[in-house]
Amino acid sequence: MKKYTYTEKKDTRSGFGAGLHEAGKKNENVVALCADLVGSLKMDAFIKDFPERFTQVGIAEANMIGIAAGMTIGGKIPFTGTFANFSTGRVYDQIRQSVAYSNKNVKICASHAGLTLGEDGATHQILEDIGLMKMLPGMVVINPCDYNQTKAATLAIAEYEGPVYLRFGRPVIPVFTDPDQKFEIGKAWMVNEGTDVTIIATGHMVWKAIEAGEKLAELGIDAEIINIHTIKPLDDDAILKSVKKTGCVVTCEEHNKFGGLGESVARLLTTELPTPQEFVATNDTFGESGTPDQLMSKYGLDAVNIVEAVQKVIGRKK
Amino acid sequence: MKHTIKELEDIASQIRRDIVRMVHGCQSGHPGGSLGCADFFTALYFEVLNYNTDFKMDGIGEDLFFLSNGHISPVWYSTLAHAGFFNKSELATFRKLDSRLQGHPTTHEGLPGIRVASGSLGQGMSVAIGAALTKRLNNDNSYVFTLHGDGELQEGQNWEAAMFAPFHELDRLICSVDYNGQQIDGPTKKVLSLDSLQAKFEAFGWHVINTDGNDMQSIVEGLHYAKTLTGKGKPILNLMSTQMGAGVDYMMGSHKWHGTAPNDEQLATALAQLPETLGDY
C-alpha cells in the first residue's frame, strides 16, 4: 500500500474559495453569485478583489440560477454558490430548463454536501444531489476529495465550456493530493495499485478508502484504490481496466446508494463486465443532527465499513 | 417610426394567420395568448428592438428579448420568420418531429432568435436580469425586454426577480405583462387573483406604465416611452391589457382557447377574419 501522509487538514470549500479567486485573476469573465452564504462558501477573497464581478442575490436561489443562466449571454462564466441542498433540490427545474436544456455555461458550486454538514441535521444534509444532477443531460458532475483537488477542479471547470455541478463540503479533512496537480475532468486518479479488489471512492470517502487500504494490507489484502472525482462523465476505461484485474469492486460515497456513484459504476459493469459489487453509501435514508464523525460512523461511512465491504465482496468472487 | 401604424397592423394580421394555421396544422398549441400578443410582437420586432438577424447568442450591442411564457411560441416563431431570422416555410414544421420549432421555445435545436428555453413558467425575468447584469459589466447600453403571462406571475420566482431588479437599478430592463385575465382553469380573478399588479410592482420599486396591447398605436408609443425612462434607476413594467384570442371573434375573451386547436371549419372562419398581407407560409 502506497503511503499517503498529510501535514494539515483543511475544508474542501476553502479549496473552492481559493480556486475561484485564482480563476477570477486568470479570466475577467469569471463572475460569482451567492445566496446569502458568502462566508460558508469562502467567496471573500474573490469579492474583495473583484467586487463588481460578484452578485449578492439574497435568499433567492431560484432567481440566482436564472440570473446565472442569463449572465452567460454576453460571455460571462458564472459560479453560483450555496449549500448543496439549495443548489440542487430547491432549484431543480431552474437548472433543468434555464441551464442544462439551454446549455448555459454555468458552474453550480455546492458546499456542505452530505452528512458531514453535521449538527444542522437532515433538512440541510442532502444525500440525493449527485443523482439529481447526473440525470440531467449534458451536466458534468464533480465531487473532489480534498482541498488541493477542489481548488484544481474549480480552475478546470472555469476553462470548460458547459454546465457543471461541483460538490464539496464543510469539515476539515487531510490534505493529501498534489498542490500543483493538473485536474482533468472525467479522468480517474489511481490512488493505489492492487490486485485483490477495486475500491472506487469519491469526495470525503477517498481518505477513508486510503485508511481502509492500510488496514486491508495488514490483513493481507492488496486493494486497488481509484479516485473518481468526476462522476459524470465516468472514466469507464479506468474502471473496467481495474475490475478486469481484481474481479470485484466496492464503491464509496457520502451519498444515498440510490442514484450515486455506485449506481453509475454498477450500470457500467452490468453492461460491460458483470462483477460482484458492494456499496458503501447511505441506504435510502435522511441524516440527522450530530458531529460529522458521529454521523459518518452511525450511517456506515467509515474505513471499517469499507474493510467489511471488501471482505464481503471478495467472498462473492467466483 | 420605421413603419406606419397601418403597415404594422398588416404585419400583425399575417402573424395571426400564421398562428391559427400553425396550431391547426399540428392540432396542438396555444392560440389564445399567441393571438392576444401579436400586436406586441409586431411592435417590438418591427419598430422597437435593435437586433441583427445574423443571430449570435451573445447579442453584444443588441437589444435582447426573452419570452417567459413560452407556450405562446407560435406568435414568436411567426414574428422571427417575418423579421428574417429563418425562412417562413419552416413555420409548417411547428410541433412536428425533427423540427426546430418545438412546442415551447428552446435553444436546443439551434433556432435563431432564441437565447434560453422557456415553458416551465416563471423563469424568464431572472434570466433577463442576468443578461442585463452582463450588459452592464460589458458597458453595453442596449436594452433587455421580456414578456410574461399574467397567470404566470403566480409563480414565486417572479417575485424574487421583481425584488432584485429595482434594488440593482436595472433601468434598461423593460418587462411586459400580457394582462388578459385568463389562465387554463379560468379567469385569474377566480383561480388566484393577481389583485393590483400595478400596486404590487410599484411597491417593489418598478416604474409601471399601462398600454393597450391590442392597439398598435398604444403599444408602439408605450414601448418607445419605456425606453425614455432609463437613467432613473427603476426597471420598467409595461402592464399591457390584451384580449386572449384577439383578432378571431369566437376565440376572444375566453380561457377556452388557451390551449385548444381549431378544426377545419373553425380555421376557415378565423382566416376569413384575418387578411393575408405578407403571403402565407
Image (cartoon, coloured by chain):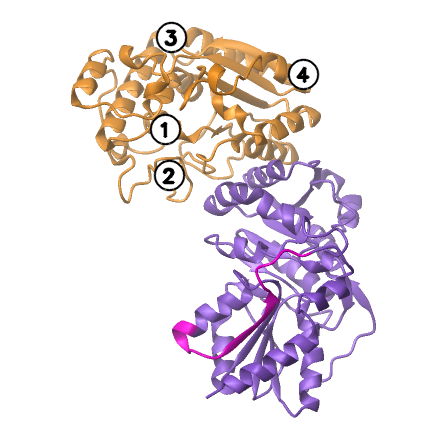
Q: Amino acid at mark 4?
A: Ala
Residue for badge 4: B203
Q: Is residue A289 left or right of residue B24?
A: right
Which of the chains bears the disc numbered 2? B
State the purple chain: A
Q: Is residue A257 left or right of residue A274?
A: right
Residue for badge 3: B5
- On whether disc 3 and disc 1 are found on a single subunit, the reply is yes
Characterize the local packing of mark 2: few (<14), some (14-19) or many (20 or more) Cα atoms within 10 angstroms. Answer: some
Characterize the local packing of mark 4: few (<14), some (14-19) or many (20 or more) Cα atoms within 10 angstroms. Answer: few
Residues A18 and A143: in front is A143
- On whether disc 2 and disc 4 are found on a single subunit, the reply is yes
Q: Amino acid at mark 1?
A: Leu
Label located before the other in sequence (2 or 4): 2
Query: Does residue B243 show up magenta in the picture?
Result: no
Residue for badge 1: B80
